[in-house]
Amino acid sequence: MSRPAFVESAGIEPMVIFLQNLVNALQWGSFYALIALGYSMVYSILMLFNFAHGDIFMVGSYIGFGVSMGLIALASSGVVALPNWLILVLTILFSMFLTSFVGMIVERVGYRPLRDAPRASAAITGLMIGIILETGNLALLGARRVSFPSLIETTTYNVSGVFVTNKKIMIVLVSLLLALALHQFVRRTKWGMAMRAMAFDFAVVPLMGVPLNTMAALTFALGSALAAAAGILFGVAYPVLDPYMGIVFGWKAFVAAILGGRGSVMGATLAGFLLGFTEIFVAMIFPSTLRDLIAYSIILLILAIRPHGFFGEPYSARLRL
Amino acid sequence: MGGERGNGANSERGRSRFRNLWKPYSRVPLLGWFFGALVAVTLERLAGTPLAQFLGLQKIPVLFGFSVMLKNPVLIPNVILYTLIIYGVPTAVATRLCIPLANGIAASLFRFPMAVTAAAHLALLYAILHVWAEISDYRVLVLRLTLIAVMLTLSLNVINGYMGEFSCSHPGFMALGAYCASVLTIGLFVNAQLLGTASLPAALGPFLFPVALILGGLVASFGALFVAIPSFRTRGDYLAIISLAFLFIVKSLIENLEFVRGPRGLSGQPDWADLPTVFLWTVLCVWSINNFVRSTIGKALNAVRDNEMAADAMTVDTRRTKMVAFLFGAFWAGVAGGLFAHVMRYVNPGNFGIQNLAEVLAMVYFGGLNSVYGSIVGAVSISLLGEALRPLEIFKWIIIPLLLILVMIFRPTGLIAFRDLDVANLLKPKPKPDGEG
């Protein structure tokens, strides 16, 4: 059993350890936040669990791997001069675009035929699509892990003892930016308004001329694009990809999404970061093997006190059951 | 024109001949099918090996020849021939011949109390399974695991189907039951590091094994309280994530308990979960769950699922009903876990993860919600399919999910949903064809 982190680094000030873990928690939480956003949107607008979402994250990561390899090959062949940072930006944008189609396909195949079915049946199709995505990846690419190309040089800044890398800053900034963009999209645009209305009342809003199928596809596309961004950022931070990496992330982000409350972009983001913080700080104080045990006990406690999550409305009679 | 009409008449005649051939089978009571199956499995026992060798198969194909067919497509006709000769034709002929006899016996059995009638049928069913499974150890193992899967699926169906919630903690309950029962049996009856030397003689073991299983089930029920108390305060999807968090907690807890050897797992459980034991427990589970869902509380549970507010207005104590059903489901999951541990004789926390959850959920929704039949069908078909498609390696995990998606799209509540298992109706003699009386 490993010793607590602060015992091993006894010579360092507690404050520095705290700040160092804060930085790590911010990075770890941004993956959860981005994935939780996709869950949360599908959940609030269609009242469905998209259990394939963790695997869409995985697919996004692999698409990002493919796109970046393609762009690197293009750049090294000398057709166009692409600096590495531009490759990364293009990779993120392209992969988000491509993965949003994966999300739309998942919606078309697994969720649209089951619109009127019991909700749990749709959750099961999602789960099964997830398994197909994992196995399909395994069958296509074989059982080896691929390593994500390192696109930006790691520069480490030492801020009075706390080590911050440029990758960490970039990951946190990009995920916050994306969450903010989604928030603005939902608040400011006509589409966003339709989504909010749908989350408010699933049954009546389509009667008012809001195209249900378009909205569902849009929701899945947005969520998948965010998951793809999370996948690429994950690849930048931990450059080893394997077909089953989406499972644990997906289920944990699902917990975060519900913890945030139904229909709240802010809530899902916050809950994602909170989950990351809990996991990192539990591992700081206790042996890291106890991480899941304590982190999820805390979440159980939070839910026992606030069963509707942070920003969710209390019991809703409009709940589509 | 004339030719076409002639064709139509021919096919019409063919169809009616086929219908005439099929017609007597509507008068076969369940007992008759059991007789037919018994003849088939006895035939396999006596003549299976020579026939298999005659047909160019190395030995008796274990699971109806699926693995042989998938490994070597050339042998497909041989395997089909084998299956027809051993299973198809004898079952059909024997069942057809013994219709009057079976109806007579079923009628005289039917005069006894229902428990006796059911016990006689179950004894016959066990005899069939026993003779079938005795051919190879692999069959025994598959059969035991399938029966355990039936228990798990049924107990999850109580929560997800009859209660209409979405619980994700079933592997957690299973783990609690498995570890509790294992600790008891290993600690008391096996000389291991766990609790030192055996404190009770091994001869006593098989008698105390049920106690260990029941204690395992009770521990699982106790664990279920931690899910039920916070999540049944309101309706909605909170059970889904609270139960999921519970699953993570249980897995992590076991991984951290050095007492049960953490992630290395617990091995050396005594070999007490043989086929009769597992069969008996499965029967007990099906019987008690079937009675539970057909009782007043089961009906109250359905009322809560369909409209909680209305049920409340009709004097149903909704919270208590949900609690009882949840703990009941968890109990049987715990017992199934205990049996699983003693069948595999090794458990580790990795057995009870998300993968396991996906499998059990697949079985429940494939078979059908709110139905005991459905759970049995779902568990048996997914388990056997999983074994039969083993030679396809990872493509198995594309075919089974695809199948399930198709089932969900065309029958969203599962294959056999919302059907009562009425034992009297199932076992009654059928002197006249269905529909005529």
Image (tube, coloured by chain):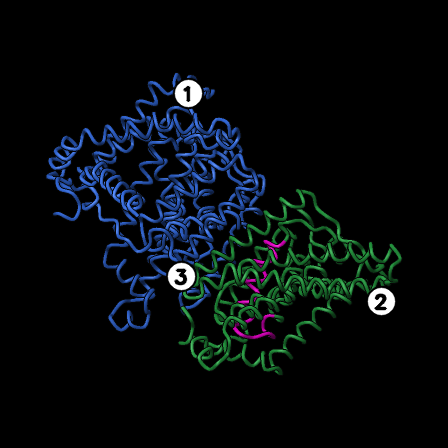
Disc 2 vs disc 3: which is toward the camera?
Answer: 3
The green one among the chains is A
In this figure, which residue is indicated by the disc labeled 1?
Answer: B52
In this figure, which residue is indicated by the disc labeled 2?
Answer: A160
Q: Amino acid at mark 3?
A: Glu
On the rendered structure, is B372 left or right of A301?
left
Q: Residues within 10 Å of mark 3 (few under 14, many from 20)?
A: many
Give the magenta-colored segment's residue range: A246-268
* Disc 2 and disc 1 in contact, CB within 8 angstroms: no
Quadrant in which residue A78 is drawn: bottom right
Give percent across and percent down for residue A281.
66, 61
On the rendered structure, is A241 left or right of A250?
right
Q: Amino acid at mark 1?
A: Ala
Q: Residues within 10 Å of mark 2 (few under 14, many from 20)?
A: few
Label for residue A102? none
| Chain of the residue that carries numbered disc 1 in the rendered image | B
| Chain of the residue that carries numbered disc 2 in the rendered image | A
Q: Main secondary structure of the magenta part?
A: helix
Element assignment for label 1: helix
